[in-house]
Amino acid sequence: MNTSLSKILILCAAVLWGTTGTAQALASAEAHSVAIGAVRLAVGGLSLLAACLIQKKNMDVRRLPILPLTVAAASMAAYQPLFFSAVIKTGVAVGTMVAIGSAPLLSGVLDYIVYSKKPTKKWLLATFTGILGCCCLLLKKDSQIDVIGLGMAIGAGASFACYTTVNKSIVGHVDPQVGASLVFTTAAVLLIPCWFMYDMSWLVSLNGIGIALHLGILTTALAYVLFSTALKSVHASTAVTLSLAEPVTAFLLGVFLLGESLTLVNICGAALVFVSLAFLTYSPKSSLNQEVHI
């Protein structure tokens, strides 16, 4: 797949992910953050599995490495409660910013450790600019950050970075849609106890059904298929940096849909993230197959 197209697919996935925090904010008060994460994985995993069966995808996964599958599923199972709990404690904008803002650096380290991929100057510059922009987006008057929530957000970022790194091994052996269905179905199984630990009555309402379908089908099934497909031709660290489009989406939704305040510094921060994404996405024809390492 063309590298530029792959990067666009990642940006589309990130925009879909950026709606998750807002969706949780619009959910019923009875919907616990951990329960929402468990429902998201269940709906997403089953949707992906059903789609694979309907399309008669090759489900022969005997060549699939067990360790990457296990790590990817565990990472997604951990990401859900960590991310949604962080959003509850710190707010949609802050939780999303810290979770995804911390992921690029962690992914760059993992990419180097696992695949011996040294960071390029282009990636370092884009990542630094993007994270700086995220920091500017966090600056608000009279804002207080919950330390526990901050730790949960960083944990979510680490989980996402870990998933992205090992997922490259998975998509190298099976169809991206099949791989995603296996990862999320396995992760959903890991979170089955949550269905019995938390109140699930909110699911019987129209609002609950809508939230569950949106989170499961759009922000999980569709978004991760796009992301996994793109990983075939994009480095894990680059993919995670492009995912900085997620916190920008969350921030804009928070401003225009949830009525959160906006300052000049916030606008500058959003602009910096957009610049970093545009810089990382742009690939001149003369350098499509070249990378300058430091």
Image (cartoon, rainbow, N blue to C red):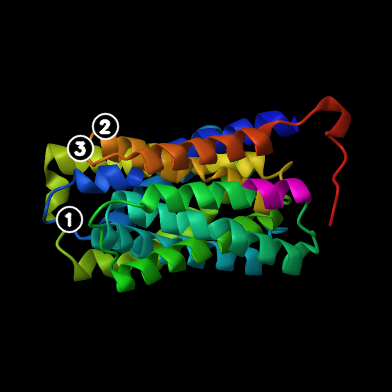
- Marks 3 and 1 sit apart, C-alpha to C-alpha, by 22 Å
Residue 73 is left or right of residue 118, and the answer is left
Which residue is rendered at x = 59% and y = 47% of the image? 129
Q: Is residue 52 above or below residue 100?
A: above
Mark sitting earlier along the chain (3/1):
1
User: Which class describes the residues within 10 Å of circle 1: few (<14), some (14-19), or many (20+)?
Assistant: some
Q: Quadrant of residue 85?
A: bottom left
User: Which class describes the residues within 10 Å of circle 2: few (<14), some (14-19), or many (20+)?
Assistant: few
Of 141 and 35, nearer the camera is 141
In percent of width and height, residue 116 lies at 81, 64
The numbered mark at residue 5 is: none
Of 125 and 285, nearer the camera is 125
Q: Which residue is mark 3?
A: 259
Q: Which residue is mark 1?
A: 31
Could you say whether the residue bearing mark 3 is in a helix, strand or loop? loop
In percent of width and height, residue 252 lies at 35, 36
Which residue is rendered at x = 43% and y = 58% of the image? 98
Of 45 and 52, nearer the camera is 45
Q: Which residue is mark 2?
A: 256
Q: Nearer the viewer, mark 3 or mark 1?
A: 3
Identify residue type, mark 2.
Phe
The quadrant the C terminus occupies is bottom right
Residue 194 is left or right of residue 177, and the answer is left
CB atoms of marks 2 and 3 within 8 Å: no
Mark sitting earlier along the chain (2/1):
1
Could you say whether the residue bearing mark 2 is in a helix, strand or loop? helix
Extent of the magenta region: 121-126
Farthest-out residue, top: 285
